[in-house]
Amino acid sequence: MSLTPPTKNKDAEFGPLVLVKNDGCSESDYPSKVEGAIALIERGACGFGDKSALAGKAGAIAAVIYNNVQGHVSGTLGTPSKHHVATFGISKEDAFPLLKKLAEGQVIPSSAYIDAIVQNAATVNIIAQTKGGDQDNCVMLGGHSDSVSEGPGINDDGSGSLSLLEVATHLVNYKVNNCVRFAWWAGEEEGLLGSDYYVSQYVIFVLLQCADICI
């Protein structure tokens, strides 16, 4: 899982695999025997980061989230939390024999290891807007400029980034009634960070404008 912390001391951790009840989205889903163990959690109902944090609060040394549909599962834990534990994703197919053994009461000795670094890093959105057109009524186009390790650079959102550039290049030949705003979002692959930040700041800006008008 993206943004997962490492296992303790970036070393292997050992403990039994313990199945978490329901969807692992409530503290009550985590039995006491999760402490010192590796929590096995079904995907769904809440975010991966929520499941990881709840596993950490319950004392788990790691968490494994298994898919509830065919295929592998991957994603991000989102905003780092002190409660997050090393978190992995496995397919429904890989989880099935484990679930069967646990249902039969078998103990599954397990180990987890991941070497990771989670830290804050500054990044920026790129926003461009036409000088022409009604500046109070914008048509907005957006795409993300970051990528994932499996598809670096143009192999990921090259189509979106280049589409924005292509539209901007041709737009100089036209007069627009409304302004046109282009946005290249940063940090999208880490949980829509760039666009979420933009929206939060835009809402604050609109509220401030309203306050000025009201005053």
Image (cartoon, rainbow, N blue to C red):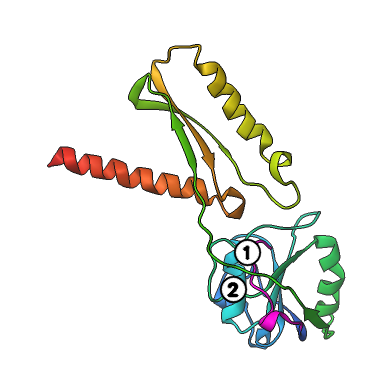
The three-letter amino acid code for the residue at tag 1 is: Leu
Question: What span is in magenta?
Answer: 1-12
Residue at 38% over, 23% down: 131
**Amino acid on which the number 2 mark rests in the picture:** His
Q: Pointers 1 and 2 in contact (CB under 8 A)?
A: yes
- In the image, residue 15 sits, relative to residue 83, either above or below, namely below
Percent x, y of residue 91: 80, 61
Q: Is residue 10 above or below residue 184?
A: below
Name the quarter where the N terminus is drawn: bottom right
Q: Nearer the viewer, residue 108 or 141?
A: 141
Which residue is tagged 2?
Answer: 84
Provide residue 30's location: percent of width, then percent of height: 62, 79
Residue 2 position by quadrant: bottom right
In 3D space, how far apart are the residues under numbered discs 1 and 2 (Cα atoms)? 9 Å
Residue underneath mark 1: 3
Q: State the image quarter where residue 164 is shown.
A: top right
Q: Is residue 50 magenta?
A: no
Kindly state the secondary structure of the residue where label 1 is placed: loop
Q: Position of residue 133 (x, y in %)?
A: 37, 19
Q: Which mark is residue 27?
A: none
Earlier-in-chain disc, 1 versus 2: 1
